[in-house]
Image (cartoon, helix red, strand yellow):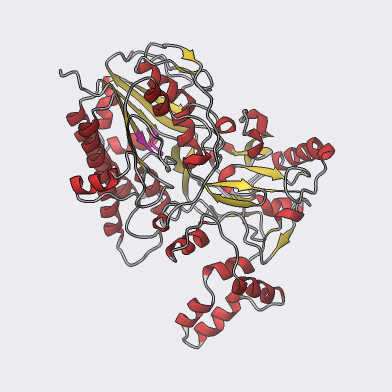
């Protein structure tokens, strides 16, 4: 074999897990992935809290918990305000930064939360939550990729909920995106001859959210993904291959629990109309579509006037019904856009509440603390008492069937530690077996049917095969944080002693060392207008 073979390849498959693979085996849809598993060793990979894309992938590629890297969800908060996260919000070095400092090159394609790119030896093509036409590393690389493979896009060519395309056409687009990932990675691997390669496939997750886990659609995207993996393995001929997912996926067959509605009845939450709420992707998307370079949103004058009208009973909903009744549907849509409807809906009044859920994907409740929040109402000396009160109240909640809503209701210290732990929720609320769907909406009732019948589970997947891999290794307890140190050990490079994970016994552990601290610069969450699809694809933000 030639000496320029890739030493280590990491294949990221969003939401991959054993239960999904078992169903795909029935149709023989993933022969290349199954071949890796049969040749090597595989097992569940425990995700982190919270087990969602924008926080979990940074945890995987840094090897640290969110308390150290600082990203807990799709948005970053400054008081009661928020903006969409970027790689600038990740306050720890990615493993490819460490490798570059040690003289090893990398090609990184489509990994979430990697825009803006790091300046490393090799190439980086940003993925999910970056802009549609991201500035890659080296600069100008995207144009080169487009010329080489015809076209490269981060997002599908339609918005979620667009009914102008058939489901078949949407799935064609899913498969086209998978092709782009594979072709771009193969081109860059040939162009840069890296020691380390990392390619991520995202639509293996989105298919469950957008199409409710439809088995035929799941099969199609996995077959397209597996085909690309097969071609990568054949062309790149990596010495050692790892497969990892950020979390698992499965049905939510019980209830949706509206946390803020419960907290309102318990006296923690106050409600209002006319605010912008927290957080929603739709108004940001609308601004970007209009050419405004923004990553947050403030209600317009018209929207605030609509909110005042709602306070006296004249809501957009009533206006829409009147106009529709007389056949003026287009007028209804024009004068009652989604953002106006949003500002006139009941929302959490964050400055005047004692505690609240900011976003469901944070999996927890934040206390409105004096001296920390801009208009905090809970004195510091009452913090622990308030937190204990919240834990007791939430721990006691049962579904209408008498089952516990939460498996754990614990202080944030249980899961988060590090310099950015205070950015986390104060009380972590983990759904029981991830069977209950959480919502931050105020909808009048505590419980309802799940907004999404499929969502994230804690057990993802880890696979190792190839040179230097112990196929008999015990993967018990394998965790998301273990991926980065294991990759670095496989490359013969000491991993950072700041990492929370360990080198899994599939390869020889080369031990840790101290690397320079991450230097925090000015965080800039600004993106360009081509970002319009990035969160609409998954609908995570309410």
Spot occupied by residue 513 in the image (x, y as percentages of width and height): 49, 14
Residue drawn at point x = 34 percent, y = 39 percent: 137
Give the left or right position of residue 390, taking residue 406 as reference: right
Residue reaching furthest to the left: 1
Closer to the camera, 250 or 152? 152
The location of residue 145, given as percent across then percent down, is: 24, 44
276 falls in the magenta region: no
Could you say which quadrant of the image residue 30 lies in?
top left
Q: Please, which residue is most extreme toward the bottom here?
A: 326
- Tell me: 53 left or right of 432: left
Horizontally, residue 449 falls left or right of residue 146, namely right
| Quarter of the figure that contains the N terminus | top left
Name the magenta segment's main secondary structure. loop
Question: In the image, residue 471 lies at what x, y percent?
Answer: 32, 15
Q: Is residue 13 magenta?
A: yes
Q: Nearer the viewer, residue 7 or 192?
A: 192
Residue at 67 percent across and 44 percent down: it is 365
What quarter of the picture does the C terminus occupy? Answer: bottom right
The one nearer the camera, 269 or 519, is: 519
Q: Can residue 501 be seen in this view?
A: yes
Q: Name the quadrant containing residue 126.
A: top left
Q: How many labels does the image show?
A: 0
In the image, residue 434 above or below residue 333: above
Q: Using residue 228 as the reference point, say whether residue 57 is left or right of it.
A: right
On screen, 28 above or below 133? above
Q: What x and y, as percent, mark residue 49? A: 56, 35
Give residue 314's quadrant in the image. Answer: bottom right
Visible residue check, residue 52: no
User: The magenta stretch spans which residues?
Assistant: 12-17
């Amino acid at each position: 074999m030639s000496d320029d073979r890739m030493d280590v390849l990491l294949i990221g498959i969003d939401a991959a897990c054993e239960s999904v693979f078992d169903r795909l085996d029935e149709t023989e849809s993933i022969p290349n992935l199954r071949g890796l598993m049969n040749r090597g060793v595989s097992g569940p990979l425990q995700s982190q809290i919270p087990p969602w894309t924008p926080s979990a992938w940074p945890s995987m590629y840094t090897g640290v918990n969110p308390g150290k890297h600082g990203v807990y969800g799709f948005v970053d908060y400054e008081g009661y305000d928020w903006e969409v996260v970027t790689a600038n919000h990740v306050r720890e070095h990615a493993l490819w930064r460490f490798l570059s400092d040690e003289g090893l090159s990398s090609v990184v394609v489509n990994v979430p939360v990697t825009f803006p790119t790091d300046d490393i030896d090799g190439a980086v093509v940003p993925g999910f939550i970056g802009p549609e036409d991201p500035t890659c590393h080296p600069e100008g690389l995207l144009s080169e990729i487009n010329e080489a493979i015809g076209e490269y896009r981060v997002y599908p060519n339609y918005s979620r909920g667009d009914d102008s395309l058939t489901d078949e056409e949407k799935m064609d687009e899913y498969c086209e995106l998978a092709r782009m990932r594979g072709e771009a990675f193969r081109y860059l691997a040939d162009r840069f001859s890296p020691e380390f390669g990392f390619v991520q496939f995202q639509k293996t997750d989105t298919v469950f959210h957008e199409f409710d886990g439809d088995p035929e659609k799941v099969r199609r995207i996995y077959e397209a993904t597996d085909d690309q993996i097969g071609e990568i393995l054949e062309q790149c001929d990596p010495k050692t291959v790892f497969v990892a997912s950020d979390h698992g996926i499965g049905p939510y067959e019980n209830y949706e629990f509206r946390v803020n509605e419960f907290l309102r009845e318990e006296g923690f939450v106050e409600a209002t109309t006319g605010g912008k709420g927290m957080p929603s992707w739709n108004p940001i998307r609308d601004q970007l579509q209009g050419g405004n370079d923004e990553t947050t949103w403030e209600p317009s004058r018209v929207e605030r006037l609509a909110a005042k009208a709602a306070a006296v009973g004249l809501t957009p909903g009533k206006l829409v019904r009147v106009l529709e009744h007389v056949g003026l549907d287009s007028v209804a849509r024009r004068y009652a856009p989604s953002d106006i409807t949003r500002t006139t809906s009941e929302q959490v009044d964050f400055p005047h509440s004692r505690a609240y859920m900011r976003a469901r994907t944070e999996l927890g409740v934040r206390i409105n603390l004096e001296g920390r929040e801009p208009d905090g109402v809970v004195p510091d000396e009452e913090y622990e008492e308030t937190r204990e009160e919240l834990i007791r109240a939430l721990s006691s909640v049962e579904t209408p069937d008498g089952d516990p809503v939460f498996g754990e209701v614990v202080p944030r210290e249980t899961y988060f530690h590090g310099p950015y732990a205070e950015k986390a929720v104060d009380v972590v609320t983990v759904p029981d077996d991830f069977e209950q769907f959480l919502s931050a909406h105020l909808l009048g009732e505590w419980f309802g049917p799940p907004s999404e019948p499929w969502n994230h589970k804690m057990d993802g997947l880890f696979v190792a095969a190839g040179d230097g891999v112990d196929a008999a290794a015990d993967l018990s307890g394998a965790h998301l944080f273990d991926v980065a140190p294991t990759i670095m050990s496989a490359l013969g490079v000491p991993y950072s002693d700041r990492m929370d994970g360990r080198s899994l016994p599939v390869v020889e552990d080369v031990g840790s060392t101290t690397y320079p601290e991450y230097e925090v610069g000015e965080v800039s969450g600004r993106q360009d207008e081509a970002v319009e699809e990035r969160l609409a694809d998954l609908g995570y933000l309410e």
